[in-house]
Image (tube, helix red, strand yellow):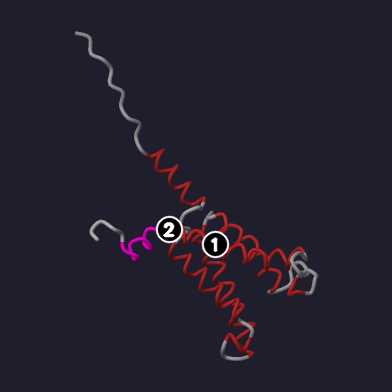
């Protein structure tokens, strides 16, 4: 039928919203890992119920990146640079911690770091989608840059 949107057309129209939801879910899960390691919530560091000692390399720094970077991406604030840092931290975790144990993520327990790495790399390239503060701030900045409409004063004859 003419005029009826196709499935690909509908999916394309929903893309920014789904991308925004993807960003929120992935970054919330990521931030929860950091909170668990730093504050002992949600099962604590590596499910031990405890926390990581402040300043220990690399775990404590990774947890800070997870909490702060995940929080920024969750809010959609500085999404691209924060996502690059989050992605890089997970690449480091995979190649330095997991990959030496075995080649495949399924064998070395590195599935979560690999997935987080690629998910954040995607967000670094796509941006925040909808529902993010990045988009809201960009919209406000664009509105401020637009010149105010000129007022027309009546001409007296």
Q: Position of residue 111 (x, y in %)?
A: 59, 80
Q: Is residue 41 magenta?
A: no
Q: Left or right: 153 with respect to 114?
A: left
Secondary structure under badge 1? helix
Q: Earlier in the sequence, mark 2 or mark 1?
A: 2
The residue at the point 55 percent across, 67 percent down is 85
Residue behind mark 1: 82
Residue under the image location 57 percent in, 58 percent down: 74
In the image, is residue 157 above or below residue 108? above
- Between the residue at mark 2 and the residue at mark 1, the CA separation in whole angstroms equals 19 Å
List x then y, in percent, for residue 60. Answer: 71, 69
Residue segment shown in magenta: 6-14
Q: Quadrant of residue 11?
A: bottom left
Badge 1 crowding class, 10 Å Cα cut-off, few under 14, some 14 to 19, many 20 or more, is many
Observer-side mark, 2 or 1, equals 2
| Residue at the image position 78 percent from the left and 66 percent from the top | 40
For mark 2, does the 10 Å Cα neighbourhood hold few (<14), some (14 to 19), or many (20 or more) residues? some
Secondary element type, mark 2: helix
**Residue at position x 52%, y 68% in the image:** 120
Q: Mark 2 points at which residue?
A: 16
């Amino acid at each position: 039928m003419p005029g009826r949107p196709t499935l690909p057309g509908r999916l394309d129209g929903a893309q920014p919203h789904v991308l925004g939801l993807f960003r929120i879910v992935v970054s919330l899960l990521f931030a929860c890992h950091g909170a668990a390691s730093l504050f002992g919530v949600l099962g604590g560091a590596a499910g031990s119920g405890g926390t990581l000692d402040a300043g220990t390399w690399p775990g404590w720094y990774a947890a800070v990146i997870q909490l702060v970077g995940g929080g920024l991406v969750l809010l959609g604030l500085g999404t691209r640079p924060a996502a690059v840092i989050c992605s890089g931290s997970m690449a480091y975790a995979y190649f330095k911690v997991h990959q030496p144990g075995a080649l495949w993520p399924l064998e070395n327990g590195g599935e979560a770091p690999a997935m987080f790495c690629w998910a954040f790399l995607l967000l670094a390239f796509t941006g925040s989608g909808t529902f993010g503060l990045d988009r809201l701030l960009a919209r406000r900045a664009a509105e401020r840059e637009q010149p105010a409409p000129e007022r027309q004063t009546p001409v007296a004859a």
